[in-house]
Image: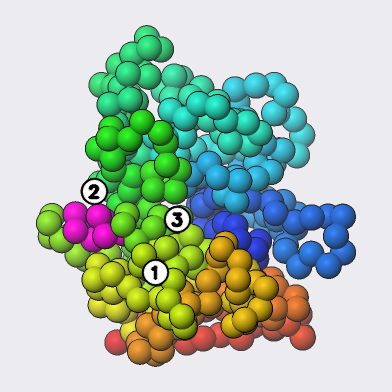
């Protein structure tokens, strides 16, 4: 059994399922964005899709669910989908259990939340107090203060915390799961410097490295960070001689293809990258890579969508396409796969020759698979 990554067409929103070599299932974000009152809404019915997959696997749980941050486009509908231990009102038949919840420290510390973000925060706090079923990323001073205010110590919960620059415990290239997760963000010091939580910049960024045969395949998940945060990650990685932790064959494009993840100016036809972003994209991206934009379709120049301040930005897409073309790679948009008319989940399979994009045929149906060969060499 080999690992697969499944990207779901949700518009400008995220949910990626990792199916590992040993059968473990991880979910990175969950955002049920579909408007069921709109017959023209092409976004997938996420809860139906995920529950069908779980039924096929004969289980009602995920080994890990990671919320990279608590913005609506990363957690909408999660209060209704998952079983939450902290309150009876969020429990019952049909809800999906979470064996280990992953959150950034900001998800513990942020006040003034409502709806799904609040549910996740309350669950994370409950599990951290209990001392099990949770992994928190980064340990800012405010987390220490929060623990002490709740009669706990940082030392007593240190085994549940992973900082930037560390591997997540419990996963190994030599274990049955054949994967490891290296955390790049959030930085604890950054949260110490800021009075207000910045969800995007304090979000979870990681590199997943898979081993199949003798081949290592790297996937870089960039959440919604901007170019300044990317610059800090690159500089920190170089300073610690961790450049290999920024290699990638699969690149989840930051912030739904926003130009702000590339440089300070959108540009006329293409966003110009900062030096660090240029190095990350053009040097660290491997031959025949896949760049995946979890977003709406790219706007046409001069259209109303093109004038929208919200991503995706045509100019950012143009830069990523040029980077992909230079390495014989591909830039893909979740809402365009296999067609913009009828998008469906897209899988990337991890093989002993690298990553292979599997695209469901838009005309024949789910039984027909169009395969992009894995990178060789």
Q: Please identify, in this view, whether the residue under mark 3 or under mark 2 is nearer the observer.
A: 3
Residue that numbered label 2 is attached to: 165
Circle 2 Cα neighbour tier, 10 Å, few/some/many (<14 / 14–19 / ≥20): many
**Along the horizontal axis of the image, is 282 left or right of 295?**
left
Residue that numbered label 1 is attached to: 265
Residue found at the very far top of the displayed protein: 151
Residue 231 among magenta residues: yes
Residue 126 image point, x, y percent = 51, 22
Q: Which residues are magenta?
A: 230-237
**Label disc, if present, on residue 223 of the rendered structure:** 3
Q: Please identify, in this view, whether the residue under mark 2 or under mark 1 is nearer the observer.
A: 1
Are the residues flagged by discs 3 and 2 in contact, CB closer than 8 Å?
A: no
Residue 122 among magenta residues: no
Q: Residue at 69% across / 28% down in the picture?
A: 90
**Which of pointers 2 and 1 lies earlier in the amino acid sequence?**
2
**Label disc, if present, on residue 373 of the rendered structure:** none
**Which of pointers 3 and 1 lies earlier in the amino acid sequence?**
3
**Snapshot quadrant of residue 228:** bottom left
**Which of pointers 3 and 2 lies earlier in the amino acid sequence?**
2
Q: Name the dominant secondary structure of the magenta segment.
A: helix
Residue 107 image point, x, y percent = 47, 34
Are the residues flagged by discs 2 and 1 in contact, CB closer than 8 Å?
A: no
In terms of depth relative to the viewer, which is nearer, 75 or 88? 75
């Amino acid at each position: 059994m080999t690992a697969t990554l499944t990207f779901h067409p949700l518009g400008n929103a995220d949910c990626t399922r990792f199916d590992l070599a040993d059968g473990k299932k991880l979910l990175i974000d969950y955002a049920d964005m579909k408007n069921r009152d709109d017959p023209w809404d092409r976004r997938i019915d996420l809860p139906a899709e995920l529950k069908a997959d779980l039924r096929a696997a004969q289980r009602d749980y995920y080994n890990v669910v990671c919320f990279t941050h608590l913005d609506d486009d990363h957690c909408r509908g999660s209060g209704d989908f998952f079983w939450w231990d902290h309150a009876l009102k969020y429990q019952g038949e049909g809800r999906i259990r979470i064996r280990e919840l992953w959150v950034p420290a900001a998800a513990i510390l942020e006040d003034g939340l409502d709806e799904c973000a609040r549910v996740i925060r309350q669950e994370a706090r409950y599990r951290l107090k209990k001392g099990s079923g949770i992994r928190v990323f980064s340990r800012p001073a405010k987390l220490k203060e929060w623990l002490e205010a709740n009669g706990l110590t940082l030392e007593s919960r240190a085994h549940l915390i992973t900082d930037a620059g560390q591997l997540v415990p419990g996963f190994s290239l030599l274990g049955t799961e054949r994967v490891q997760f290296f955390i790049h963000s959030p930085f604890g010091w950054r949260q110490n410097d800021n009075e207000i939580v910045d969800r995007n910049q304090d979000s979870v960024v990681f590199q997943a490295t898979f081993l199949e045969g003798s081949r290592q395949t790297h996937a870089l998940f960039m959440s919604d960070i901007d170019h300044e945060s990317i610059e800090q990650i690159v500089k920190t990685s170089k300073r610690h001689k961790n450049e290999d932790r920024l290699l990638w064959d699969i690149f989840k494009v930051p912030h739904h293809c926003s130009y702000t993840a590339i440089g300070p100016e959108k540009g006329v036809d293409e966003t110009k990258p900062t030096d660090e972003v240029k190095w990350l994209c053009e040097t660290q991206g491997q031959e025949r890579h896949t760049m995946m934009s979890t977003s709406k379709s790219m706007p046409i120049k001069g259209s109303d969508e093109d004038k929208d301040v919200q991503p995706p930005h045509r100019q950012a897409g143009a830069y990523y396409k040029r980077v992909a073309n230079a390495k014989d790679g591909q830039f893909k948009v979740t809402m365009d796969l296999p067609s913009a008319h009828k998008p469906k989940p897209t899988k990337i399979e991890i093989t002993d020759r690298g990553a292979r994009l599997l695209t469901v045929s838009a005309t024949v149906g789910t039984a027909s698979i169009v395969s992009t060969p894995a990178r060789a060499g």
